[in-house]
Image: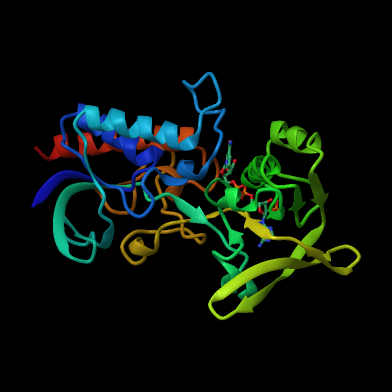
């Protein structure tokens, strides 16, 4: 089966590309992949996405994106693209390791995923008290003590969200100032059950193991200025130290930069292969907003439409 336009990824960029490509009549097919709705689905309160005058939850916003794309005729499928070959035309892809499809244009909107600290102990307690998603796992820590690690928008949003569930939240950051937006910082400073632990790195996650069951009990941390090592007792740890682009599938197929973001040409979503476009966080190490992702999905769909028009 050869399609005109396959969109890989169902986040703000992918769904917006679907909306525009549907209206352009190029019959887009979206493969939503492992995390339909993208990173916004793990964001509790969104107050900076245009068109929502009141705070709205990420999943509701993403559901609206999807409904709009469906209404306009986008074919949205739950499969994952597990292999691509852009060296021949039309482009070849494999869905769920099983069946192959072909497309005349491809829009890559696979986004980015949460980064981990890389500690052995983090690996051991992942899913047993260590998480990257407060919206998903915060409810397990009602009335308990948790830590959030990081100093960006995500960390401060997660800390604030958790402060309404947990009894106490430590916000642990490796420097003495936050890169998060001022409005989030002000909110954190005013929240009485959030304790800031600055200039501090995580050395080890401490816990107990009993057969298959595991439980986080604390965190060993170090002040980077005094080098003092301390331990804090807690029940849960939320790692919020940024994201990495989801591009493993495209290594050797497209030009990537040193951080593995897909390289695009200036303001345009053109990749190193003509007819393959990249939109959203997968090609954006700078802005990484739902709003900018949606805009680049729009651009990619317009490029795909023009590419196809030039062929005919
Ligand atoms: P980010 O802005 O890259 O911040 C990552 C934070 O983690 C930084 O404070 C960084 O410290 C720290 N960090 C990185 N590696 C670390 C390590 N190995 N150990 C300890 N700390 C580490 O990532 P983000 O907060 O996930 O945000 C990603 C993007 O999404 C940003 O563009 C952000 O604006 C956007 N976003 C927006 C909203 C919103 O507008 N509502 C919400 C969430 C995210 P340093 O500061 O020292 O580098």
Please determine whether, in this image, residue 15 is positioned above or below residue 94: above
Image quadrant where one finds the C terminus: top left
Q: Is residue 281 left or right of residue 240?
A: left
* Residue in the image at 61% along x and 45% along y: 154
* Residue in the image at 42% along x and 43% along y: 280
* Residue in the image at 60% along x and 69% along y: 125
Q: Residue furthest right?
A: 226
Residue 36's x, y, as percent? 36, 46
Q: Is residue 251 left or right of residue 186?
A: left
* Residue in the image at 89% along x and 68% along y: 228
Residue 28's x, y, as percent? 20, 39
Q: Quadrant of residue 165?
A: top right
Q: Which is more toward the observer, 220 or 258?
A: 220
Please determine whether, in this image, residue 32 is positioned above or below residue 117: above
Please determine whether, in this image, residue 221 is positioned above or below residue 120: above
Residue 4's x, y, as percent? 15, 43
Residue 158's x, y, as percent? 63, 45
Q: Is residue 291 visible?
A: yes
């Amino acid at each position: 089966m050869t399609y005109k336009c396959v969109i890989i990824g169902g986040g703000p960029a992918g769904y917006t590309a679907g909306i525009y490509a549907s209206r352009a009549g190029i019959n887009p097919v979206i493969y939503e992949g492992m995390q339909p709705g993208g990173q916004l689905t793990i964001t509790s309160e969104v107050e900076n996405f245009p068109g929502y005058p009141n705070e709205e939850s990420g999943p509701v916003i993403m559901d609206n994106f999807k409904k709009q794309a469906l209404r306009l005729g986008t074919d949205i499928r739950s499969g994952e693209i597990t292999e691509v070959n852009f060296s021949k035309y039309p482009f070849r892809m494999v869905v769920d390791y099983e069946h192959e499809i072909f497309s005349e244009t491809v829009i890559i909107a696979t986004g980015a995923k949460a980064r981990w600290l890389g500690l052995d102990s983090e690996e051991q307690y992942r899913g047993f008290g260590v998480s990257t998603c407060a919206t998903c796992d915060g409810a397990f820590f009602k009335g308990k003590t948790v830590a959030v690690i990081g100093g960006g928008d995500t960390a401060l949003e997660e800390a604030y969200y958790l402060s309404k569930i947990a009894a106490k939240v430590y916000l642990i950051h490796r420097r003495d100032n936050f890169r998060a937006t001022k409005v989030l910082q002000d909110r954190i400073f005013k929240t009485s059950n959030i304790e800031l632990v600055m200039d501090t790195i995580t050395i080890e996650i401490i816990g107990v193991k009993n057969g298959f069951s595991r439980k986080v009990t604390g965190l060993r941390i170090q002040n980077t200025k005094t080098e003092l090592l301390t331990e804090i007792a807690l029940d849960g740890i939320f790692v919020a130290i940024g994201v990495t682009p989801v591009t493993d599938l495209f290594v050797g197929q497209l030009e990537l930069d040193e951080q593995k973001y897909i390289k695009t040409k200036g303001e345009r979503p053109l990749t190193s292969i003509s007819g393959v476009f990249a939109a959203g966080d997968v090609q954006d190490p700078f802005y990484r907003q739902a709003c900018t992702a949606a805009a680049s999905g729009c651009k990619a769909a317009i490029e795909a439409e023009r590419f196809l028009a030039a062929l005919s």
